[in-house]
Amino acid sequence: MTYFILKFLHLIGAMVLIGTGAGIAFFMVMAHFTGNATKIAGVARIVVTADFLFTASAVVVQPITGVLLAREVGYPLTEGWIVLSIVLYLVIGAFWIPVVFMQMRLRDLAEAAERDGTPLPPAYHRIFWTWFGFGFPAFGAILGILWLMIARPEIQLFG
């Protein structure tokens, strides 16, 4: 029973990470292309909240359930596909952490433009396109982890 509970929680966490990531990206891009500071500010507020509620929770749950699941099944954490999954998870974190701060800055810049009745500043556009670019390696890495979890390929990383 422990195995199924851990697997269930691990799969829910993966779905939350993928779904929230894709949803946040979609809504931020759609808001951006309106060029409307009010809409962008509103969406960015929701996106920042969603990232803290859902993504951050799943980010904590995934490694805990992953380690417990590996221990339950008897997989050593030095197994190649697990090590590669951990490396990819760290890559995701290296992109996601700055993205959270970028989203907060995008929100603040859009709120200021909305409040002042001015166009979105050049800094907004520069940060937006950096944010957009950071999504590709992070999302690619999460898809890589998903594939590794399903396929569990024989990967020799150590001697």
Image (tube, rainbow, N blue to C red):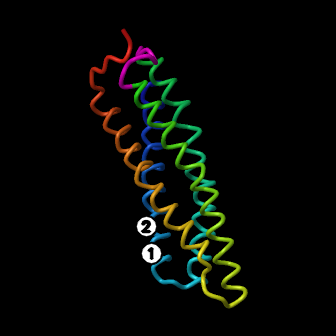
Hey, which quadrant is residue 88 in on the image?
A: top left
Q: Nearer the viewer, residue 3 or 76?
A: 76
Give the position of the C terminus as an image quadrant.
top left
Residue 99: x %, y % from top left:
57, 56
Name the residue furthest top: 159
**Residue furthest bottom as drawn:** 117
Residue 95, above or below 119: above
Q: Are marks 2 and 1 in contact (CB under 8 Å)?
A: yes
Question: Badge 1: few (under 14), some or many (20 or more) residues near its Cα, within 10 Å?
Answer: some
What secondary structure is found at the residue carrying circle 1? helix
Tell me which segment is drawn in magenta.
74-81
Compared to residue 18, the image places residue 80 above or below, namely above
Q: On screen, 106 above or below 119?
A: above
Residue 119, given in percent of the width and then of the height, sits at 61, 86
* SS at badge 2: helix
Residue at the (65%, 63%) spot, across then down:
104
Q: Is residue 66 magenta?
A: no
Identify the mark at residue 30; answer none if there is no mark. Answer: 1
The residue carrying mark 2 is 26
Between 47 and 116, the residue placed more toward the observer is: 116
Residue 47's tag is: none
Q: Quadrant of the N terminus?
A: top left
